[in-house]
Amino acid sequence: MANHEEQFKKLIAHTKEYGFIFPSSEIYDGLAAVYDYAPCGIELKKNIREYWWKSMVQMRENIVGVDSGIFMHPTIWKASGHVDAFNDPLIDNRDSKKRYRADVLIEEYIAKIEDKINKEVEKAAKRFGDAFNREQFVTTNPRVLEYGNKIKKISARMAHDLTVNDLTDLKKLIEELEIADPVSGTRNWTDIRQFNLMFATQIGSVSDEANTVYLRPETAQGIFVNFLNVQKTSRMKIPFGIAQTGKAFRNEIVARQFIFRMREFEQMEMQFFVAPGTELQWFEYWKEQRMKWHLSLGIPAEKYRFHDHEKLAHYANAATDIEYEFLFGFKELEGIHSRTDFDLSRHQEFSGKKIQYFDIERNESYVPYVVETSIGLDRMCLAVMSYAYNEETLPDGSERTVMKIPPVLAPYKVAVLPLVKKDGMPEKAREILSTLQKCYMCQYDEKDTIGRRYRRQDAIGTPFCVTVDTQTLQDNTVTVRLRDDMTQVRIAIAELNAFVAERLQ
Ligand code: GAP
């Protein structure tokens, strides 16, 4: 773990040094849990958003998009349940004066037990070598079983306490597990209380309660309240979906882990409207589709896992998280929820407007059921950057830091580099640049040795470096150096565009 913490610190430093992520308002000493995307970061973020939109909207006949306002009618948040129940259970340590989410403290405790299980598995794998059967080991080893049971018991009790809002028992659980404050090391805890996460502000010039509006804590409600408008204007038939990407705001009290948990972040959400009774089939469908999307980026399958919810929100009849193994362990990256007809019914009730769909095949009207997929764009950026960050020792003993970002997501696709800054090479390189720039984000660099320039491109994850040399001036060919294995191929300038396009597919 110490090694992972070290790696995480290095990653954060790297993303700042190479222009991916900056702390917000840095010259004023920053603003906690808010970050700015730098030139490489915005390209990465934009590419992930486009990759999602392409798969969720462009390549599907039955999903369309919206871009709703961040401010919405305040009653929307009453109807959705956010005003009354969008809370975190908070607990303070009296000695360190630090505030924590009670559920997170318990989850961290569970993660430590999971670490112990992993260590047992590693030890056994070493001991038994090729004959090791993981499945058999974890289902029969008494110590692993004991750890597993302990996790189950703790999770079930926490889920129950959160569901019935039994904060006294939740505190008791923390005490029984002897969870200590990581800062002070003491167990001098206050009682747990609920804290609403929405940011409120005033609209217009008069500041009274009637003018209170909220910064949306999720983009989903902007989809629900536009359901009828979109269905009618786009002539959509159930089953169909509405997608939206955009900012969401939560007054996260425990905001740590870089861009994993921010107060201002971006979501990519899709609500899929289905006939009542078919939602669980669609839930399975979207689970599979979303996992396929993640795996299509070439990130190994073992970095992902599903985590089915034990504690279902009162409006959901199935829910799972796609978790990614960040440098601080497996954590939620995306949520897939079967939200029943809760949201649309509540908006029908609170607005007094009928929100129904007439199903020609069933010859009946109903409030559609909804299956939601919701992924945090910033978390996805963090997942990609964590996977991509590599420190390598090369065969000649030198070191390089390379961001092995999936090429389709890389901020810059091509760097064009004249071998030397004379003999007409810069002019030729700029000619190539101006052609490629029409299709791709490119960089031009003529400063320093070619080796150093390659390293700079490795550090920001550019998959292709095109070098113009003496031979280029004679026969219009260039070398293309590939980021991941550093091999080089010589190709005609005329083939460059197709070469890059093929590898970005
Ligand atoms: N509409 C459903 C919804 O908002 P959620 O699980 O609260 O569900 C969905 O959020 C996703 O949004 C999460 O899986 C996560 O990726 C992202 N997310 C939530 N809170 C976040 C935060 N404070 N900072 C960054 N991303 C966050």
Image (cartoon, rainbow, N blue to C red):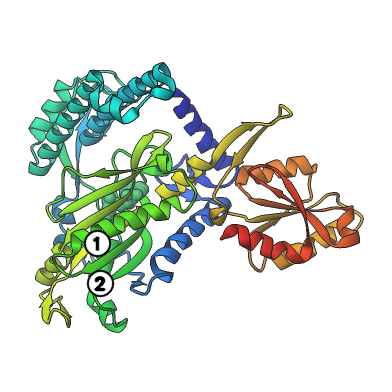
Q: Residue at x 31, y 22 (%)?
A: 116
Measured from the top left, where is residue 137 in percent x and y? 30, 25
Q: Quadrant of the C terminus?
A: bottom right
Q: Quadrant of residue 171?
A: top left
Q: Nearer the viewer, residue 32 or 299?
A: 299
In the rendered image, is residue 370 in sight? yes
Measured along the vertical axis of the image, is residue 504 above or below residue 188?
below
* Residue hosting label 1: 282
Are circles 1 and 2 on residues that touch, CB within 8 Å? yes
Q: Residue at x 13, y 32 (%)?
A: 170
* Residue hosting label 2: 239
Q: How many marks?
A: 2
Marks 1 and 2, the one that precedes in the sequence: 2
Q: Is residue 356 left or right of residue 97?
A: left
Q: Is residue 417 left or right of residue 443?
A: right
Q: Nearer the viewer, residue 278 or 184?
A: 278
Q: Residue at x 25, y 48 (%)?
A: 320
Measured along the vertical axis of the image, is residue 12 above or below residue 237?
above
Number of residues whose C-alpha sits closer than 10 Å to that of mark 1, classed few (under 14), some (14–19) or many (20 or more): many
Q: Is residue 84 left or right of residue 308?
A: left
Measured from the top left, where is residue 243 in percent x and y? 34, 67
